[in-house]
Image (cartoon, rainbow, N blue to C red):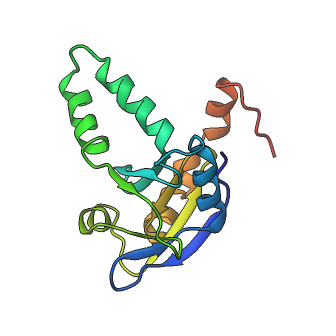
Amino acid sequence: MVFRGRFSRSIDPKGRLLLPQEFRDAMAASAPAGSSEAGSFMLTTYDGALVAFSWNDWVELEEKFMRIPNPSPRVRAFRRLVIGGAEKHTPDAHGRILLSPDHRAYAALEREATVLGLVDRFEIWNPAKLKASMEPDDLEGVTEELSASGIDFSL
């Protein structure tokens, strides 16, 4: 399952957002055959945006959180944000999902959204917040950081 690309989307007055067909196809293909979770995914809050995980990846993440024996206050706060902010979604027959008022408020989503594929997950952003998050000053030194992680990205 791979999510790629950037898609501009409108949010209708009811709070529905049309997911890219490629993303819906990837989610449907990621569920085990005959699974009741086919096409479902988890959408949660993080970094000022909404982050979508496949059902299987989400279950694995929850299991990892449950194995932490005595989490610090920072980890507990993070768990409240990410696990507590999670909602299960299954696109309707038209490929739309209904974004809850809490999710729309957290990500400052009103009429427009940008859906951004990030290989193993996708994010839903307020377009202005996404643009601000990618300002050149914020990206200073990122190629060195990537190189230290084993990713050579020289242009």
Please tell me how many numbered marks the rendered image carries.
Answer: 0
Is the residue 7 above or below the residue 78 in the image? below
Of all residues, the one furthest to the top in this rendering is: 69
Q: Quadrant of residue 74?
A: top left
Task: In this rendered view, identify the residue nearer to me: 113 or 63.
Answer: 63
Q: Residue at x 51, y 73 (%)?
A: 93
Give the quarter of the figure containing the N terminus.
Answer: top right
153 and 97: which one is in front?
97
Q: Is residue 131 above or below residue 123?
A: below
Tell me which residue sits at (24%, 44%) in the image. Answer: 84
> Is 55 situated left or right of 67 in this image?
right
Q: 107 or 138, which is in the foreground?
A: 107
Q: Picture coordinates of residue 102 (x, y %)?
A: 24, 63
The quarter of the picture where residue 48 lies is bottom left
Q: Residue at x 35, y 63 (%)?
A: 107
Is 24 above or below relative to 145? Answer: below
| Residue furthest front as drawn | 34
- Give coordinates of residue 133: x percent, y percent: 48, 57
Please give the name of the residue rendered at 47% of the width and 48% of the height, measured from the top-left corner: 37
In the current view of this chain or complex, which residue is farthest to the right?
155
Q: Is residue 50 left or right of residue 154?
A: left
Q: Residue 126: percent from the left, percent from the top?
A: 43, 68
Outermost residue on the bottom side: it is 13
Q: Residue 141 location, x and y as percent? A: 61, 39
